[in-house]
Amino acid sequence: MNMMRGLLILFLLLAAMPAHARFGENPDAWLKQMETALETINYRGTFVYIHDEQAETMRVFHRVGPDGTRERLISLNGSAREVLRDDDQVKCILPDDKAVFVEKRHDRGTVARGIPLNAARNTEHYEFQLLGTGRIAGRSSRLVAINPRDGLRYGYRLWLDEETGLPLRSELVNNDGQPIEKMMFTEIEIGVEIDDELLLPSVSGDGFKWHVRSAEKETVLQNTSPVRFEALPAGYRIVRTEARTEGEQPSYHLVLSDGLASVSVFAEPLQEGKPALAGLSRIGAVNAFGVRLPEHHVTIVGEVPEATVAAIAEAVSLTGK
């Protein structure tokens, strides 16, 4: 009994210690704590998201509880926009356009793009470094670098709260070491109560046009997709395949990932007269490559280097199934 009591006291003491005291100079431990913090800690705040030479200011409410993880983001500049996420679906409300888009949720992503999860488990293709300290939104932070081991994926810089491990700032970094996408909190409250009303949309959506991506039209395929690859860039593999039936022929959506970076592959039946991407295109951190096959058009898109989408495009084919 005394041993059990001693272990309990030790656990409570460790849990009460700030992250910097528990993890010291171990970047892997910091990254694992970041994942734990995102899944267990409530917070609310304001952050700036910079991409494509544009700056978006967003207000976020993030709550973890018996009903799972719920999150609401509200744009504070530009066109009005709200995004609501829970464990099952993502809802985007555009009041200016009187439109609502709803689709099922596939990933664990949170806040803005650019918070890499599962990073500490991917030492084959990335290496990790602690680069010092910083101060973000009035809080002390540790800077963790995630560096790719080749030119087939981007790197990251993460400023993690010293007390909890929550990401306070992130940068997606290209192969030249230059940031191409940034997110940074300007103010944040951690460990606060998030009332139900703060997670509700500011408009009901009555009279809006609703675009609901029906799960009934989607079928998850298990190794039966006609989309094939002669070879994939090192480290990437197929992690999800879906078929969608709208029209006479199905379209296909595959997700490729190295455990951190991800790429979507869309294969759609050819439609004469419909504009389609041909070759390489880039918008900010996102690279895309379009290729025409005998009966389908395939688009490869992801926050990965040009060489990665080009290699996937060169390797893709359909079996004619």
Image (cartoon, rainbow, N blue to C red):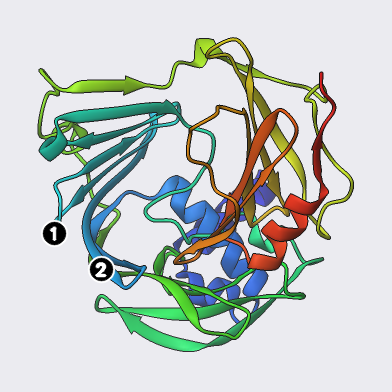
Along the viewing direction, whichever of 274 and 146 lies nearer the viewer? 274
Q: Which residue is mark 2?
A: 55
Where residue 321 appears, as percent x and y from the top left, is: 81, 18
Name which quarter of the figure residue 155 lies in: bottom right
Q: Secondary structure at mark 1?
A: loop
Q: Can residue 294 be seen in the rendering of this structure? A: yes
Contact flag, marks 1 and 2 (Cβ < 8 Å): yes
Q: Which circle's residue, 1 or 2, is located before the other in the chain?
A: 2
Where residue 108 appears, as percent x and y from the top left, is: 51, 43
Q: Is residue 54 above or below residue 140?
A: above
Where residue 306 appears, as percent x and y from the top left, is: 64, 66
Residue 198 located left or right of residue 258: left
Identified by mark 2, the residue type is Ala
Residue placed farthest to the right in the image? 230
Q: Residue at x 41, y 27 (%)?
A: 103
Along the viewing direction, whichever of 87 and 219 lies nearer the viewer? 219
Q: Residue at x 59, y 83 (%)?
A: 130
Q: Is residue 172 above or below residue 97?
A: below
Q: Residue at x 54, y 34 (%)?
A: 106
Identified by mark 1, the residue type is Asn
Q: Which residue is mark 1?
A: 77
Q: Secondary structure at mark 2?
A: strand
Label 1: few (<14), some (14–19) or many (≥20) C-alpha neighbours in 10 Å:
few
Q: Quadrant of the N terminus?
A: top right
